[in-house]
Amino acid sequence: MSNILEIQNLVVSYGGIEAVKGIDMSVPAGEIVTLIGANGAGKSTTLKSISGLVKPKYASILYKGKEIVGSSPDHIVAQGITLVPEGRRVFPNLTVMENLRIGAYLRKDALKEDLEYVFSLFPRLKEREWQMAGTLSGGEQQMLAVGRALMSRPKVIMMDEPSLGLAPLVVKDIFNIIQTINQQGITVLLIEQNANMALKIAHKAYVIETGTITMEGTGAELLANEEIKQAYLGKTK
């Protein structure tokens, strides 16, 4: 399967500190790829570099074979890559519907079909479409953040800690939705503290430690790896 994204020698510095130290990653089209690691390992910086929010010191980032380093964030969204940021970042003083429409801000065509698609994935958003986003529960805000990203019709959706701070039942719902989105043809690049859940659904996985890729394999291979179990999975049944 061809790679829709290829990251080569990604180096990102904040001041004099290298947060990412020359990593290489590939994301096959149509798959779920997860990046696991401790806080501060460089996971979010990697996603922000791909989305144009952080300028790398060095890198080649190829999307469908074309270089996107140096492209503006809105150009990258228009090309088909979108980011669901950590912490959800919904607009609290706008309604659910207004938040969703903002996700399609680069589009000029009709949104009805896409709104129906998002509401089919997240019926609770349909029930609350005129409610202020700031009054939603954490789980509903996460659904809204994912729905807003889908409104740009992405080919690649990147998710930064989608389960953070959510109740276990809601986490299960979010992971089911990630799989559903992927089954409908969208490539997923996932950062997730819940390494157990992430590796269970991932086709491919990477481990990043202090800005360096230290391990890669299928989700199943890393899930079975004793080092990974001890470092990221805790006690396993």
Image (spheres, rainbow, N blue to C red):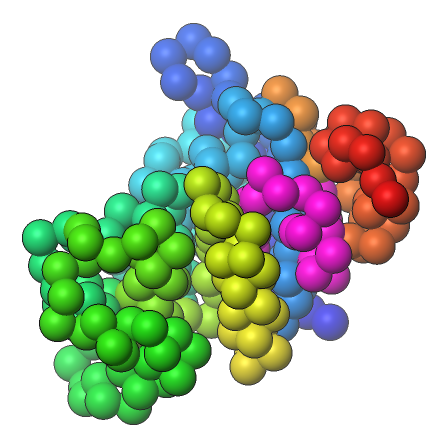
* Left or right, residue 155 beside residue 123: right
Residue 70 horizontal/vertical position (percent): 35, 44
Q: Quadrant of residue 234?
A: top right
- Residue at left offset 52%, top offset 69%: 177
Residue 82 horizontal/vertical position (percent): 38, 59
- Asked whether residue 26 is in view, the answer is no
- Asked if 121 appears above or below 229 in the picture, the reply is below
Nearest to the observer: residue 88 or residue 61: 88
- The total number of labels drawn is 0
* Left or right, residue 149 beside residue 189: left
- Asked if 79 appears above or below 52 in the picture, the reply is below
- Asked whether residue 13 is in view, the answer is yes
- Asked if 228 appears above or below 97 in the picture, the reply is above
Q: List the single residue furthest toward the left.
A: 93
Q: Quadrant of the N terminus?
A: bottom right
Nearest to the observer: residue 96 or residue 192: 96
Q: List the single residue furthest toward the top.
A: 16
Q: Quadrant of residue 2?
A: bottom right
- Residue at left offset 78%, top offset 43%: 216
* Left or right, residue 94 beside residue 149: left
Nearest to the observer: residue 81 or residue 85: 85
Residue 218 horizontal/vertical position (percent): 81, 54
Looking at the rendering, the stretch of residues picked out in magenta corresponds to 187-206
* Left or right, residue 211 beside residue 121: right
Residue 221 horizontal/vertical position (percent): 87, 50
- Asked if 40 appears above or below 221 in the picture, the reply is above
Q: Quadrant of the C terminus?
A: top right
Residue 104 is inside the magenta segment: no
Residue 197 is inside the magenta segment: yes
- Residue at left offset 33%, top offset 73%: 124
- Residue at left offset 52%, top offset 23%: 40
